[in-house]
Amino acid sequence: MNAGVFNIDGSGPEHRAAQELLPWYAADNLSTDESQRVARHLQHCIACRRDLARERALLAAANDDDVMPPGLDMDAALARLMPQLGAQDKSGDASDSDDSNRPTPPAASPAVAPLRATLPWWRRAAANEPSWLRWAAAAQCVLIVGMAAMLARPDAADTANLPSYHALGNGAAPSGGNLVVMFEPATTEREFRRILQRHGARVVDGPTVTDAYLLRVPDAERQRALEALRHDPAVRLAEALDDSGAP
C-alpha cells in the first residue's frame, strides 16, 4: 500500500492545474514535462484519478463506431436540454453587471499556459468561454445517454435500476464481463485502447468506485489474456470472473 498522503479534497494550485490538463492527458496530447507533472499528481490525488478514469471512458466511447446504437435520437435529446441551457443563460446575464466589481483573475499558471498557446482557436474558446462550457456540458450529457444505451443488454431484467458504479464485492457483475482489471493511474488513453485491442477486449462497465473496469474477452482466449494482462506494466490488477460474476 502506498504510504503517501492522498489529496481527496480537490484543493491547491497543483490540483487545479492538473484538473485543467486532464482531458489532454487522457488523450495523450501533452508535452513530456506536462505529462510527467500530471502523472506525479495522480499518484497522490484520488479525485483526479477518478476524473481521469471518466475522461478515458468518454474518449473510448467517442472513438467507438458502435457508440450510437439504433433508435437513439441525439437531436431529440439535445432539444430536451435546451430549455435548461436557456435558463442558465438568463441567470448568467443577470450577474454580468457585477463583473466590473470583481477582481481581475490571476494569470494562467506556467503549467497550463504553454498548452493553451498551442491549441486551435476553437479549443481555447471552449476552455475559457462560459457559453462554450454550457454547450460542452450538454454534449457530454448526450454522450452519456449514448453510452448507457450501448451498455444495455436485451436480456437485462431491469437496467433502469443499475447504479452508476459497482463495488467489486457487491454480488453479480453486469452481464457479459469475464475479467476485472485495474490500470496504473499514469496509463494514457492511447495505451488503454492499445491494451484492449491487443487482447480483443471490450469495456462492459467501469470505472467502479475502486477505479476498476469490467472487460469481456472471448471465452477461449480468457486465460491467455489474463496471464498477459498480469504481466503488462500498465496493469495493476487482473482477475477472472466466473459465470456468477465472482472472482
Image (cartoon, grey):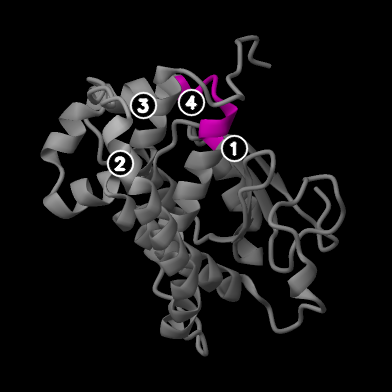
Residues tagged 1 and 3 counted as in contact (Cβ below 8 A): no
State the CA–CA distance, disc 1 to disc 4: 22 Å
State the CA–CA distance, disc 3 to disc 2: 16 Å
Residue 8 in view in this figure:
yes
Q: Which residue is mark 2?
A: 28
Characterize the local packing of mark 2: few (<14), some (14-19) or many (20 or more) Cα atoms within 10 angstroms. Answer: some
Residue 197 in view in this figure:
no
**Which is more foreground, mark 2 or mark 4?**
4
Q: At numbered mark 2, what does the secondary structure look like: helix, strand or loop?
A: loop
**Residue range of the region highlighted in magenta in the rendering:** 41-49
Q: Which residue is mark 1?
A: 230
* N-terminal label among 3 and 2: 3
**Which is more foreground, mark 2 or mark 1?**
2
Left/right placement of residue 53 relative to residue 109 reads right
| Image location of residue 63, percent across then percent down | 37, 64
| Image location of residue 76, percent across then percent down | 47, 85
Q: Which residue is mark 4?
A: 42
Q: At numbered mark 1, what does the secondary structure look like: helix, strand or loop?
A: helix
| Residue 17, numbered circle | 3
| Image location of residue 243, percent across then percent down | 82, 63
